[in-house]
Image (cartoon, helix red, strand yellow):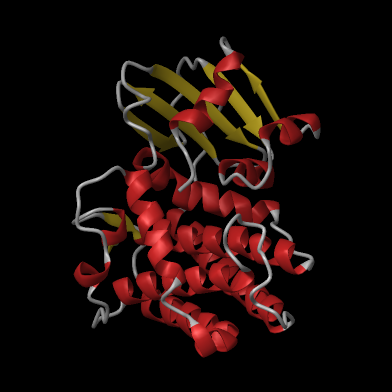
Amino acid sequence: MDDVTTYDPVAEHERTRAALEAALGRLVELLGGIDDLEVPSGLPAWSVGDVGAHLAAVYLAYGSAVSADGGVDWDALLPREDTTFGKRIAAVNALSVGLVAGAERKRLGAILAERGAAFLRHSEGLAPDLPVPSPWYGPGRTVPLAAATGLLLSETLVHGLDIARGAGRPWSVGAAEASLVIGQAMVTMMPLALDAEKAKGVRIAFDLALKGGPRLAVVVEDGAATVTRDAPPRAYDCRITAAPTAFLLVSFGRMPMWKAVALGRMRAGGRRPWLATRLSELITAP
């Protein structure tokens, strides 16, 4: 029987805040060394400047959500039609690229520094489970502050990699940083990102064990998903053991799964190990 681990949500949230502040500093430094922001990034169809503009929009969104005065009329900006989560996020992402354009892009580093600092300042001392308005995920949608902080960290790390790949600069995603993203953000986001149509009639329980933690129980059952940290022992269909950085990059499509497996950074086990690939088919990155 596997041991059930526990974690301190307040302490982990503070570590995530510290990691976000450090990653933001690295990102600003990276952008400061790039002369041409219109070179292609590591993300298809987006330039380095597009990726930076998207990040600026993400920082603005969460900074305004935790600010006392809000400051952004999201109803005027966001899609109003009822659609799937994936299509909604695609529309929001396309919108975000144009929110910092023209000559203003020359200030991307400064804008990111200002907006990232504003989020950290406005959210300081707030409880990790505080609901944060997140209408870009759907009308009336909220996420816990811990998830919002983890999401900002994931955006900074993953899109920092996109910018660095486009500019031919080094960029690292550490295991400790990746673990914080998985533990803080993915618990909330994986159920939201489930493809409900593909999940109809599906019943699979995944044991997701990240080296060094966290450990997640991901249960997909007839069009819905639940993700639980430190779940009591139970029977699973498939166990996925992975290095945190590899799992993060595979989840966001920045590393092919075959490469993670070939490098020994991801493996499947349990009663039905062949189901491991279903996880990325059912829960897709936006």
Q: Position of residue 16 (x, y in %)?
A: 53, 62
Q: Is any atom of residue 125 visible in this view?
A: no
**Which residue is at the far top?**
271
Q: Residue at x 57, y 63 (%)?
A: 46
- Viewer-side residue, 34 vs 219: 34
Query: Left of 176 or right of it: where is 86?
Result: left
The image shows residue 127, relative to residue 225, as above or below, that is below
107 sits to left or right of 144: right
Residue sitting nearer the eye, 239 or 223: 223
Question: Which quadrant would the N terminus be assigned to in this image?
Answer: top right
- Residue 53 can be seen in this image: yes
- At 41% from the left and 36% from the top, the residue drawn is 228
Dividing the picture into quadrants, the one containing residue 49 is: bottom right
Where's residue 95, x and y in %?
A: 38, 66
Give the quadrant of residue 187.
top left
Q: Viewed as shown, does residue 132 lie left or right of 28?
A: left
- Vertical placement of residue 88 versus 160, above or below: above
- Residue 23: quarter of image: bottom right
Q: Looking at the picture, does residue 160 appear above or below residue 220?
A: below
Depth order, front residue of 168/101: 101
